Amino acid sequence: MKYHSYYLYTAIALSALYIVMAIIAAPFFTRISIQNSLANDIEAAKQEAHIIATMISKQPTTQKEKANLIQTIKTSIEYTNTKNVFNSVFDWSGRFISHPDHNKINELAPHATELMAGDNKINEEELYKIIFKKADSLSSEIIHLLPVKNSDMIVASHINKQRVIEQANSLRNKVYIIFLIIGLVTLIFFLTTIRIISNYYEKKLELKNTKLEDGVLNLSKLNASLENYQKNLSDFKLEREEEQRKEEEQATNTSFITEEEKAPKTATKQRILTYVRNELLPVATEDISYIYVENTITYVVRKDGKRSTTSESLDLIYSYLDEKSFFRANRQIIVAISAIDTITKFGNSKLKIQVNPVSEIDIIIGKNKAAAFKQWLDL
């Protein structure tokens, strides 16, 4: 993997974030679940206590019938102390008459919780605090008392603290396992998604870089061709000057030369007639950097940066310029090979020319003329 370190850092960051969220969220979900369970248990204990109290209050009060009733209650609540809540019965002396654990019969019942001292009511939030946050101050398992009418008996609802704590620990472990599974699945999903997206953009970036490298390579070749052409043109001018010098020397040594032989054999002009204000100024073509048209006025810019105007059109001027030294970049400008500084890519298939001195307008060669320009440089 090309960017494996970034994937590793991303995985570590996501894992750390998820662990923090799990540490905060898991206890919250556990507490809510336990409190809901306690609320159901309290309500179930109260209903069962009410049923037992009603059953006791409607029975005859003879000793034999009372003994039968107590035996019936013992049978109905036997071994219920394995549940979260269970009920028992004790008399006004505080001794158990009926209890799920037969060994506690005739033992003194524990005191009720201090939360029941006022109105004999306790809710699930308070009970949760007693069990898990105030365990040391818990003095009794009784959470609800219901005196039986016309009787010396009291029905008590107990909370099985140990079982609730075990159930809470089991639920907490399950919540953490669920969070762990969700975290792993989420992490794998995010890493896979990031891998797919990054691979897609890496391929696009590589394609763009390849195209850019090809463009840079082509521009490098083009600029190299420009340098070679400028060098060849300079050598060509030197050779032509040398040939002209030799011809002049030969002409001085020849006594019979016709007027036709003395006439120039080139159709190109060596000078262009321009204007500076109201003065005429002839400009040698070898001193011209570029010629351009702006607002129907033709400007001639020399190598020293000075500018003058001419009444001739670009088409006419280009017709008598040396095609090896000048190129018609577009309808607006003619540029000299000696003035070209650099060539850069412009848009998709266009080229932009930087000249010296700097042109006031952008010199852009369109895609239709780009091939001709490259061929011109390779001449």
Image (cartoon, grey):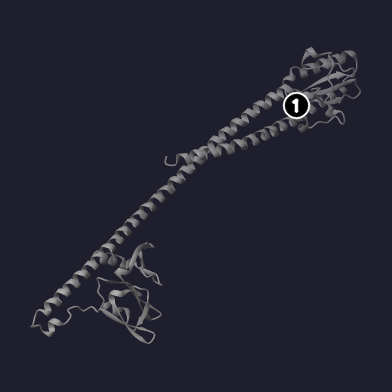
Residue 319, x across and y down, in percent:
26, 78
Quarter containing the C terminus: bottom left
Residue 15, x across and y down, in percent:
56, 37
Q: Residue furthest bottom?
A: 278
Quarter containing the N terminus: top left
Q: Is residue 317 above or below residue 31?
A: below
Q: Nearer the viewer, residue 289 or 2?
A: 289
With 253 as the anchor, is 121 left or right in this view?
right
Q: Is residue 129 above or below residue 295?
A: above
Question: Which quadrant of the structure image shows residue 172?
Answer: top right
With 320 as the anchor, is 292 left or right in this view?
right
Callout 1 amino acid: Ile
Residue drawn where x is 72% and y is 32% of the image? 35
Residue at numbered disc 1: 131
With 159 as the anchor, is 182 left or right in this view?
left
Q: Nearer the viewer, residue 22 or 34?
A: 22
Q: Is residue 111 above or below residue 345?
A: above
User: Could one spot residue 58 in this view of the protein?
Assistant: no
Q: What is the secondary structure assignment of the residue under circle 1?
A: helix
Q: Nearer the viewer, residue 138 or 80?
A: 138
Residue 219, x across and y down, in percent:
33, 59
User: Could one spot residue 370 in this view of the protein?
Assistant: yes
> How many circles with numbers are drawn on the protein?
1
Q: Nearer the viewer, residue 172 or 244?
A: 244
Residue 173, x across and y down, in percent:
62, 28
